[in-house]
Amino acid sequence: MSIRRAHAVSLGWVVASFAMAFMLYGQLPESIPTHWNAEGVVDGYTPKPWGPFVLPLVTAAVYLVLVAVPRISPRGYGVARFQGIFEGIQAVLVAFLFLINALVLLAGIGVAVPMERVVPVATGLLLVVLGNYMGKFTKNFFCGIRTPWTLASDEVWLRTHRLGGRLFVLAGVIVLVSGLLGGGPVPVIAAVAVAAAAPVLYSYFLYRRIHGDTHGPTDDAGSHGPV
């Protein structure tokens, strides 16, 4: 996907989110269901006029932040080297938020939406896509597995993201299947926790093995964990 096309697609999802909220506004109740528990039961509401527009506003904010990131990245840690990948991630994330917004609005007008199944399936697909992209990230401060050890070593960054990509894909498949089968939150939480924590630990031990540094890097890059 070209950069220009990715921006157009992302902006299209943002506009569609607001358009859907405006179109369904008159059919929505005074309080919009905006949160569901693990069993798919509504346990949170947001009143009008904000209720229908909370997720469109979040979608627009995420899009604007992702547009700004390439412009504010510090020299040597920008996303230019994987700009196409970054733009693809932008489009996928905004599309995911549009889908969640659409499901919430449909549920608000009375459509029986099985949130406990649909959301995990969508989340699983998102993790699979992110995992497939992850191995192509180059060193930056905004996306990826950003630990002191990956930021201090190109080799550690590369190998950690290859592992992280595989784990994200595996976690995505588990989350997706759990959603389809109604497996509940336990396998989802376990899969995501392993996919998030394992690469962080791996980066530490890999750095020590490659560089022989028992204290780790001494720069102030900080540890931020996976996307």
Image: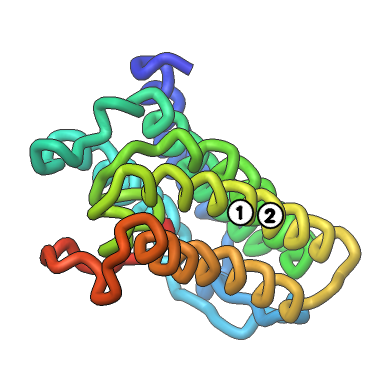
| Cα distance between the residues tagged 1 and 2 | 6 Å
Above or below for 166 versus 5 = below
Quadrant where the image shows the C terminus: bottom left
Residue 38 picture quarter: bottom right
Residue 39 picture quarter: bottom right
The amino acid at mark 1 is Phe
At mark 1, the secondary structure is helix
| Residue 141 in the figure: left or right of residue 19 | left
Identify the residue shown where x is 46% and y is 39%: 19
Above or below for 211 versus 70 = below
Q: Which class describes the residues within 10 Å of circle 2: few (<14), some (14-19), or many (20+)?
A: many
Asked if labels 2 and 1 touch by Cβ distance under 8 angstroms, the answer is: yes
Q: Position of residue 4 (x, y in %)?
A: 35, 16
Q: Position of residue 195 (x, y in %)?
A: 59, 64
- The residue most toward the right is 181
The amino acid at mark 2 is Gly
Q: Which residue carries the number 1 mark?
A: 168
Q: Which residue carries the number 2 mark?
A: 172
Identify the residue shown where x is 58% and y is 45%: 131
Q: In front: mark 1 or mark 2?
A: 1
- The residue most toward the front is 212
Above or below for 67 versus 114 = above
